[in-house]
Image (cartoon, grey):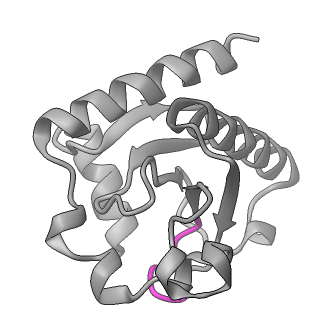
């Protein structure tokens, strides 16, 4: 079974606490762990593995919407730079990881805190200490939803 499809099913059942907004081609969710404050994902509505598996029109709309989501994340959480990942090696369902970055967010791990997210230790990134509280999660969802509303209306 596909973990992304499982999460989308929870969204449709109104039982995914990380769900922020449905767009035409995908679902915006806050990441389960928040070392990088505002870390979000954009889950494709279609269960495909690769971008080239999508029809050209859907693919273009999906990429356009992913850019809108990234801009909303940047504005909502004050990122200095956005990092984008679309890997799918572990979860073979097209989805984007959107990491808002600020100077020094991995300071202790080299190069003055300037490097890829995977320089941050896995066990720290996915520590329970990095899970948002229910109140913090609601706050994050509200601020991101507001930015998405503004950007999807232009």
Q: Return the x and y of residue 84 as percentages of the image width and height.
A: 67, 63
**Foreground pick, 141 / 100:** 100
Q: Residue at x 21, y 37 (%)?
A: 136
**Which residues are drawn in magenta?**
89-96
Q: Return the x and y of residue 46 as percentages of the image width and height.
A: 56, 56
**Foreground pick, 124 / 60:** 124
Q: Is residue 82 above or below residue 13?
A: below
Please tell me whether residue 95 belongs to the stretch shown in magenta: yes
Whether residue 54 sits left or right of residue 14 in the image: it is: right
The mark tally for this picture is 0
Q: Is residue 59 above or below residue 85?
A: above
Q: Residue at x 29, y 39 (%)?
A: 12
Q: Quadrant of residue 25?
A: top right
Q: Quadrant of residue 11?
A: top left
Q: Is residue 15 above or below residue 22?
A: below
Q: Quadrant of residue 126?
A: bottom left
Q: Indicate the quadrant containing the C terminus: top left, top right, bottom left or bottom right.
A: top right
**Foreground pick, 40 / 50:** 40
Q: Return the x and y of residue 108 as percentages of the image width and height.
A: 48, 82
Instruction: Name the chief secondary structure element in magenta.
Output: loop
**Foreground pick, 2 / 124:** 124
Please tell me whether residue 120 belongs to the stretch shown in magenta: no
Q: Return the x and y of residue 15 as percentages of the image width and height.
A: 16, 41
Q: Residue at x 67, y 62 (%)?
A: 83
């Amino acid at each position: 079974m596909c973990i992304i499809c499982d999460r989308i099913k929870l969204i449709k059942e109104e039982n995914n606490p990380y769900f922020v907004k449905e767009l035409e081609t995908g679902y915006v969710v806050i990441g389960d762990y928040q070392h990088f404050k505002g870390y979000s994902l954009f889950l494709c509505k279609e269960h495909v593995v690769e971008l080239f598996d999508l029809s050209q029109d859907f693919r273009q709309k999906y990429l356009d919407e992913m850019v809108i989501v990234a801009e909303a994340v940047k504005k909502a959480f004050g990122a200095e730079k956005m990092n984008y990942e679309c890997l799918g090696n572990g979860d073979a369902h097209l989805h984007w990881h959107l990491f808002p970055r600020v100077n020094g967010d991995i300071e202790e791990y080299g190069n003055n805190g300037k490097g890829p997210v995977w320089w941050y230790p896995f066990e720290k990134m996915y520590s329970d200490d990095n899970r948002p509280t229910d109140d913090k999660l609601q706050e994050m969802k509200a601020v991101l939803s507001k930015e998405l509303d503004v950007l999807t209306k232009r």
